[in-house]
Image (spheres, grey):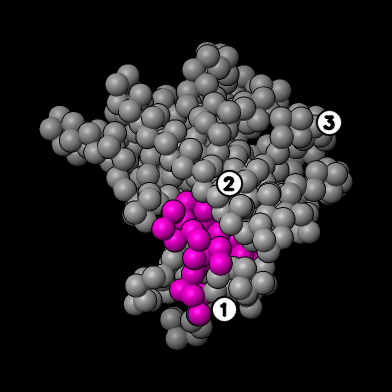
């Protein structure tokens, strides 16, 4: 059965992570995979996470199954984190959340759910989008179409082009939007643009699907969710995939959530039961540990305050790096967009050949598209990275 299989190339982001690990040069710099790094270049466990784990270890009494929806307590705190504490959607029973194995698990279960609702669903993704969106959604059998998003010259949102391409979407099509910190470009929609996209979605009868993987790392927890919350308040139905990988630093614990918003509580109950049967036939139930950490932190005022202050510090650090990086690159051109963009990623706008040169000659790793993880910089390496980039340009 296996002998006809050809060897596949590795996923480019994971391949770059491996290349970086295999590089023995002491001065190497990793601006590749999207994980937060501190000033020392480490991806630390947050203090609030450590404390929650300590409490869990002491208080845990069973490892029995939780069920396909995961922990009800986690689902409740995630609904509030994403939609806000005073959300009428939660109060009115129009929103339900299930715990998933990471944001990827949420994206894939959403895709399987769309196929169940409507087997020939088309989902529109931004050009560019996170590379793994394509196999996660396409692998469920959905048809993928792309909408224009980024102006390749200015590396900012080309909003008229975005609206124009979404005019071709048909009623019932799904539109995938990045909640904040657009991956890979760092270019987010403004409040006005969220409103205009919402109008288009309503007018054309599209289903909005928001990937919220970086809440809290752009401008703050509530600010980052403002566009999503506005949209959620206007439409009858919506789907959100949320990740706790970055804002809780739980990457390997695979902690995420999938939210369905429906027109009425009765529709939502029925839709959620269908979603749970999809889950049962895929991985049966999500892993418990990461979600228990999040539930512990968000359910305890003191831990929550500590976590928010740690997350705020990470966000500030990225913003500071963005300004310093844009300044250090300035002699080579206008990189002011890096300072204006949000989250971990921005494109440098250099060629794959220049990216290769940076990796081979300077030990600086970034995606071939020139996407850099700004959080991988620090005061020690930033001047050298900027001068290497200037030298290849
Ligand atoms: C990234 O884009 O680098 C992250 O989301 C990590 C991943 O799994 O690709």
Q: Is mark 2 within 8 Å of ligand 1?
A: no
What's the residue at 34%, 77% (across, down)?
A: 24
Residue 107 percent location from the top left of the image: 54, 47
Which residue has dot 3 on it? 203
Q: x and y percent of residue 192 in the render? A: 76, 30
Question: Does any portion of residue 237 appear in the rendered image?
Answer: no
Q: CA distance from mark 1 to mark 3?
A: 48 Å
Q: Secondary structure at mark 1?
A: helix
Which of discs 1 and 3 lies nearer the camera? The answer is 1
Q: Residue furthest front?
A: 331
Above or below: residue 95 compared with residue 373: above
Answer yes or no: is residue 245 visible.
Answer: yes
Q: Residues within 10 Å of mark 2 (few under 14, many from 20)?
A: some
334 horizontally vs 310: left or right = right
Q: Residue at x 44, y 53 (%)?
A: 379
The mark nearer the N terminus, 1 or 2, is 2
Q: Which residue is mark 2?
A: 323
Please determine whether, in this image, residue 169 is positioned above or below residue 21: above
The quarter in which the C terminus is drawn is bottom right
What segment is highlighted magenta in the picture? 359-387
Q: Name the one closer to the observer, 340 or 223.
A: 340
Membership of 30 in magenta stretch: no
Q: Which mark is residue 212?
A: none
Asked which secondary structure carries label 2, the reply is helix
- Which of the labelled discs sits on residue 357, or is there none? 1
Q: CA distance from mark 2 to mark 3?
A: 39 Å
Q: Where residue 216 sits in the image (x, y, percent)?
A: 49, 35
Q: How far apart are labels 1 and 2 at the CA level?
A: 25 Å
Q: Residue at x 71, y 34 (%)?
A: 190
């Amino acid at each position: 059965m296996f002998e006809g299989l050809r060897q596949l190339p590795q996923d480019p982001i994971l391949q770059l992570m491996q290349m970086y690990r295999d590089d023995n040069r002491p001065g190497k710099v990793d601006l590749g995979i999207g994980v937060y790094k501190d000033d020392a270049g480490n991806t630390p466990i947050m203090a609030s996470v450590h404390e929650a784990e300590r409490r869990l270890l002491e208080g845990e009494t069973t490892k029995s199954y939780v069920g396909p929806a995961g922990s009800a307590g986690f689902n409740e705190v995630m609904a509030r984190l994403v939609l806000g504490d005073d959300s009428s959607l939660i109060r009115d029973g129009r929103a339900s959340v299930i715990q998933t194995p990471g944001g990827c698990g949420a994206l894939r279960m959403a895709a399987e759910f769309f196929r169940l609702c409507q087997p020939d669903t088309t989902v529109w993704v931004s050009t560019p989008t996170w590379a793994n969106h394509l196999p996660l959604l396409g692998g469920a059998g959905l048809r993928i179409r792309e909408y224009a998003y980024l102006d390749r010259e200015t590396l900012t949102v080309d909003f008229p082009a975005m609206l124009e391409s979404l005019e071709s979407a048909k009623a019932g099509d799904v539109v995938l939007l990045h909640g904040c910190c657009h991956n890979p470009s760092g270019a987010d929609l403004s409040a006005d643009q969220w409103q205009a996209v919402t109008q288009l979605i309503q007018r054309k009868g599209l289903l909005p699907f928001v990937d919220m993987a970086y809440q809290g790392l752009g401008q703050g927890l509530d600010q980052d969710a403002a566009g999503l919350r506005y949209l959620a308040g206007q439409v009858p139905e919506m789907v959100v995939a949320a990740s706790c990988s970055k804002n809780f630093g739980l990457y390997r614990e695979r902690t995420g959530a999938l939210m369905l918003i429906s027109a009425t509580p009765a529709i939502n109950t029925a839709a959620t039961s269908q979603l749970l049967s999809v889950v049962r036939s895929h991985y049966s139930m999500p892993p418990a540990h990461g979600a228990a950490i999040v539930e512990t932190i968000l359910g305890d005022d003191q831990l929550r305050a500590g976590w928010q202050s740690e997350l705020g510090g990470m966000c500030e650090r990225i913003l500071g790096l963005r300004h310093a990086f844009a300044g250090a690159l300035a002699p080579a051109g206008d990189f002011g967009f890096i300072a204006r963009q949000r989250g971990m990623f921005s494109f440098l706008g250099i060629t794959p050949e220049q990216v290769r040169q940076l990796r081979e000659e300077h030990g600086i790793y970034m995606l071939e598209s020139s996407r850099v993880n700004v959080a991988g910089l620090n005061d020690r390496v930033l001047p050298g990275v900027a001068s290497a980039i200037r030298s290849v340009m």
